[in-house]
Image: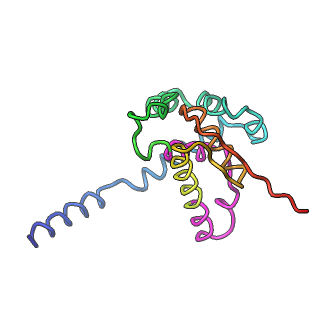
Amino acid sequence: MHDWLSEGKRTILEAINGMPLEQNRGERNDWFDRLRARLPDNYAQLDAVPVDQVVEWVFNRLEHADQEQFENLFPRGFWADVDGREEGSLAGFAFLLFILGIVRDPRVSKKGRVRREKHFLGQFRDCEHIEAASRCAAFITFEKGAGRLAKAAFAYAGVRTEVICVEVRES
């Protein structure tokens, strides 16, 4: 048994060592540069797009191959059929929308690496909460960005959960 584990570990390490990580990083950076060039310079324009149309608006600005791939992965209404739901797919979709800029959290790109990673992970947890809330009657949040992200994801994916953004006012 010990030899089997050592052999498995060796196989995994060889696979990892054979990955073209620098090439992938360069390709990813090139893709993001091309994406940023297709999105508005002023995100107020994106914020002005109605929440039930913003996913298509962003998808229509992608390169054709990327648009086709995203629409195949996440066809409109993909979450509407309870029996056809794949665990984690709505959270992944919501995170994709975050990456595409439908909402922005400035804390993800400012200050030190540890703080940025903390807020980036927090954004992913928000996406997991959005998926969990899709099984409920309502998603209640204090965060405008999380509310907009949930509304956009739910509208496109075919979720009937109501999104309620609570605003606390000082008296």
Q: How is the image coloured?
A: rainbow
Q: Mainly helix, strand or loop, the magenta region?
A: helix
Q: Residue furthest front?
A: 137
**Horizontal and vertical percent for residue 129?**
55, 53
**Horizontal and vertical percent for residue 133?**
55, 47
Identify whether 163 is placed above or below 59. Answer: below
Q: Is residue 138 magenta?
A: no
User: Where's the N terminus, which quadrant?
Assistant: bottom left
Q: Is residue 106 magenta?
A: yes
Nearer to the camera, 51 or 64: 51
Identify whether 64 is placed above or below 38. Answer: above
User: Residue 22 lies in what quarter of the image?
Assistant: bottom left
Nearer to the camera, 60 or 28: 60
Q: Residue at x 91, y 62 (%)?
A: 171
Q: Residue at x 55, y 50 (%)?
A: 127
Q: How many labels, in total?
A: 0
User: Residue 47 lies in what quarter of the image?
Assistant: top right
Q: Which residues are magenta?
A: 91-120
Q: Residue at x 74, y 41 (%)?
A: 41
Q: Residue at x 65, y 34 (%)?
A: 38
Q: Is 90 situated left or right of 3 in this image?
A: right
